[in-house]
Amino acid sequence: MEPVLPNGYLKCVSAVVILCLACPALAVVLHPDANSPADRPDDSVVGRWADNGTCVVIGSQYVLTTRHQGGGLGSMVQIGDANYYVDQVWTYDEPNRADLRIARLAGANLTDYAQINSNPGEASGLWQVVIGGYGKGRGADLTDSNGVVFGYGWDSNANDILRWGQNRLQGSIDNSHDPIYDYYVDLVYDDFDKPGHFSGYDGEAALAEYDSGNGWFTQIDGNWHLVGLGYSVPHADTLSNWFDDPNTLSYDPEYNYAIRISQYAGWINGIIPEPATCAILAAGAAVLFRRRSRPRK
């Protein structure tokens, strides 16, 4: 399901990709006094990709990440306290079809990794997701003309801090076009609720710079499965996250977008040797949500 766009707005979510050319990638932004979710994957399931992104461990030698943040053969990936170098890369096998790649880490023998979600009902079932990524966190409060906080800027740190938060999927968008890099991608999305809102979580998470490729996880039968890879937010150009609209002074949480892993599960599992896909579960109730989105940068 695709968010309803106001008249005159671009109908391609990719225009807000956190792919700013000068600052590729995304990080997890939390509200003040928020608590990271206690129930979450091991920290070693999420890796630091080079100096500008995040990746997810999906096998004993393999990580999955997005393509737009650069890097590749020879890039350093940090998993826990260990550093590895990429010695092979696979990109999605249809040109421009997905901002997605698998990298093999030379000499790695990792024991903690996420399984791959193959359930296409994830977007309609309002699944709760735990989100982990490296990069910039919450910076200064943003206030409107009345002094009311409507969002946060991003801090100035490098991508050397792993943060965890959580959120709930709201829907999906198929074949979204990114005009900057000319990718076509299938996405899931959530929204960034204001502090204390009835639909929010303790640890409500948004995305920011240096978090591209971060992990959106859900637990199925006691195992953590990868549902999405962090992809974009509406305000990458202003280096900020909003939960209200300062122009209309109304509650209007922004969306965060992630690559929809279920749509690429066959390709992923055709490359990595470990069995990484869960059995498909019965799809949840199809609850349709249609909300406003903002134009991409």
Image (cartoon, rainbow, N blue to C red):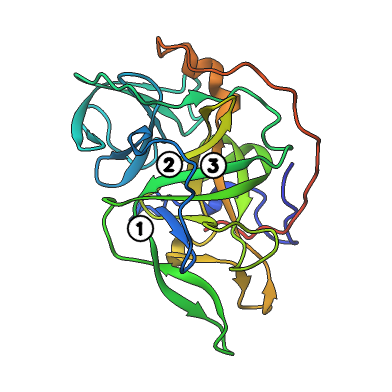
Rendered position, 125 above or below 221: below
> In the rendered structure, which amino acid carries the disc numbered 1?
Lys
The earlier-in-sequence mark between 2 and 3 is: 2
* Figure disc tally: 3
Q: Quadrant of the N terminus?
A: top right
Rounded to the nearest whole Å, what is the CA distance between mark 1 and mark 2? Answer: 12 Å
**Residue 265 percent location from the top left of the image:** 55, 20
Q: In this view, does 251 lie to the left or right of 224?
A: right
Residue occupied by mark 1: 136
Q: What element carries label 2?
A: loop
Disc 2 + disc 3, Cβ < 8 Å: no
Relative to the observer, which residue lies in front, 210 or 199?
199
Rendered position, 42 above or below 61: below
**Residue 71 percent location from the top left of the image:** 27, 36
Count neighbours of disc 3 (C-alpha within 10 A) and say few if under 14, some if 14 to 19, many if 20 or more. Answer: many
> In the rendered structure, which amino acid carries the disc numbered 2?
Asn
Q: What element carries label 3?
A: strand
Residue occupied by mark 2: 214
Relative to the observer, which residue lies in front, 111 or 95?
111
Disc 1 + disc 2, Cβ < 8 Å: no
Residue occupied by mark 3: 258
